[in-house]
Image (tube, grey):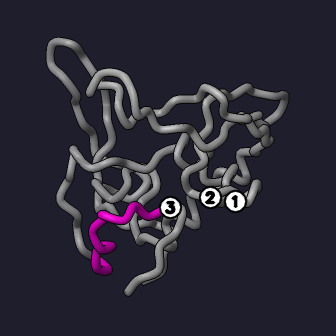
């Protein structure tokens, strides 16, 4: 059984084989800058995977002040609202995260999953979003549209 980390969702597929081209999965959840920022904050705080940030403030330089906590899940209300985050009564925790720490979190994600941190292994990035045409895609320039992490040897 493979070990789980803060960066790898439980239902994620296995990493691509070395040299393989990954077919785009446009419905799969991606991994991006905000996910890396949350992962860096969790590592810095020693927080569990349930910790989420709800407010961010840019500080001078490359620092970001994040405030977050573990949200309550709604048990009341309409079926549409049940199970969603509820921040009432949650004591927020503040942490400062730098761009270097976010880049380190991206490197950890790539080492653990074997996927590119820019496209989350899809090989494509969103180019634009339109009300009329929907999403348009472009090849990921970081991994050369392979989906494999460029920092992983193999």
Q: Are marks 1 and 3 in contact (CB under 8 Å)?
A: no
Q: Does 63 sit left or right of 10 as displayed?
A: right
Q: Which residues are magenta?
A: 7-19
Residue 48's disc number: 2
Q: Is residue 82 above or below residue 95?
A: above
Q: Residue furthest front?
A: 76
Provide the secondary structure element on which disc 1 rests: helix
Q: Is residue 24 above or below residue 136?
A: below
Provide the secondary structure element on which disc 3 rests: loop
Q: What residue is drawn where x is 39% and y is 59%? A: 143
Q: CA distance from mark 1 to mark 2?
A: 9 Å
Q: Residue furthest right?
A: 60
Name the N-terminal-most of marks 1 and 3. Answer: 3
Name the N-terminal-most of marks 1 and 2. Answer: 1
Q: Residue furthest bottom?
A: 1
Q: Does 144 sit left or right of 20 as displayed?
A: right
Q: Is residue 29 above or below residue 10?
A: above
Q: CA distance from mark 1 to mark 3?
A: 11 Å
Name the main secondary structure of what is drawn in magenta. loop
Per the image, is 45 magenta?
A: no
Name the N-terminal-most of marks 3 and 2. Answer: 3
Dot 1, crowdedness within 10 Å: few (<14), some or many (≥20)? Answer: some
Residue 83's disc number: none
Work out which quarter of the rendered image holds the C terminus and state it.
bottom left
Residue 107, position in %: x, y? 58, 64
Q: What residue is drawn where x is 46% and y is 66%? A: 150
Which residue lies under the disc numbered 1? 43
Q: Quadrant of residue 56?
A: top right
Which residue lies under the disc numbered 3? 7
Residue 139, position in %: x, y? 28, 46
Provide the secondary structure element on which disc 2 rests: loop
Q: Nearer the viewer, mark 3 or mark 2?
A: 2
């Amino acid at each position: 059984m493979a070990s789980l980390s803060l960066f790898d969702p439980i239902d994620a597929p296995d990493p691509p084989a070395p040299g393989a081209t990954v077919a785009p999965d446009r419905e799969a959840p991606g991994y991006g800058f905000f996910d890396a920022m949350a992962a860096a904050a969790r590592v810095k705080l020693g927080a569990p995977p349930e910790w989420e940030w709800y407010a961010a403030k840019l500080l001078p330089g490359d620092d970001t002040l994040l405030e977050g906590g573990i949200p309550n899940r709604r048990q009341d209300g309409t079926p549409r609202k049940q199970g969603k985050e509820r921040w009432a009564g949650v004591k927020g925790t503040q942490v400062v995260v730098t761009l270097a720490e976010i880049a380190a979190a991206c490197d950890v994600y790539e080492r653990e999953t074997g996927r590119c941190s820019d496209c989350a292994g899809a090989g494509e990035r969103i180019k634009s979003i339109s009300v009329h045409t929907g999403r348009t895609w472009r090849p990921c320039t970081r991994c050369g549209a392979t989906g494999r992490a460029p920092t992983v040897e193999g």
